[in-house]
Amino acid sequence: TPPYNKPTLAGLKAHYEAIGQAVKIPLCLYHVPGRTAQKLSPEDLATLCDIPQITAVKEASADLFLFSKALIHSKANYLSGDDFTYLPSLALGGQGVISVVTNVFPKAFVEMTKSFWAGDNKRALTLHNALLPLIELLFVEANPSPAKDLLAHMGVIQNTLRLPLVTVLPANHEKLVTCFEQTKNQLVELGAFE
């Protein structure tokens, strides 16, 4: 949903219809109440998904009940927008994830997904649980600052941010690096790191 002014459902529908007419490509609606201060109901999401260009929804309310009900009411593909809800969202019929932790440990998420679809729920849950401490810590400060901090630590990127985002505090950097190393060691043992 658009930020700041909390439009009505009619306003949201008009907004997305205008975008759909302007770009004429498939759209992914982002439902991220933590950033927009506007939580939509499953019925509201279904109404918006009636717009032909909306083919997917990033559902990042962390509400699995809403996720489940939204799937019942909508023909769009639903993607988990929170790393910690990804595995349970698959069991509810979710189609994928828009993730933060996959920037750091992509193979672990691929392996977790393969394990789930192969029916090896024990391995999928083991991988999920191995990632949970880092998933939580990646939000110790405003996203994407912690993820960029770790990627810079790994030598993947330079830690460049635009204001008002700033680099993480030194104490949080140390926590991130420690958790990263612990998680990496677990994933190596599980054959889910390269």
Image (cartoon, rainbow, N blue to C red):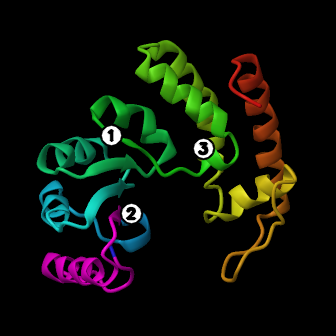
10 Å crowding of disc 2: few (<14), some (14-19), many (20+): many
The residue beneath circle 3 is 135
Distance from disc 2 to disc 1, alpha carbons, whole Å, reads 16 Å
Residue found 65% across the figure and 33% down from its top: 107
Q: Residue at x 44, y 69 (%)?
A: 35
What span is colored magenta in the figure?
2-31
Q: What's the CA distance linking mark 3 and mark 2?
A: 17 Å
Residue labelled with disc 2: 32
- The quarter in which the N terminus is drawn is bottom left
Does residue 167 appear to the left or right of 134 in the view shown?
A: right
In the rendered image, which quarter is residue 158 located in? bottom right
Residue denoted by label 1: 94
Q: Amino acid at mark 1?
A: Gly
**Image height check: is 116 above or below 82?**
above
Task: Identify which residue is drawn at 16% across, 75% down.
Answer: 9
Q: Residues within 10 Å of mark 3 (few under 14, many from 20)?
A: many
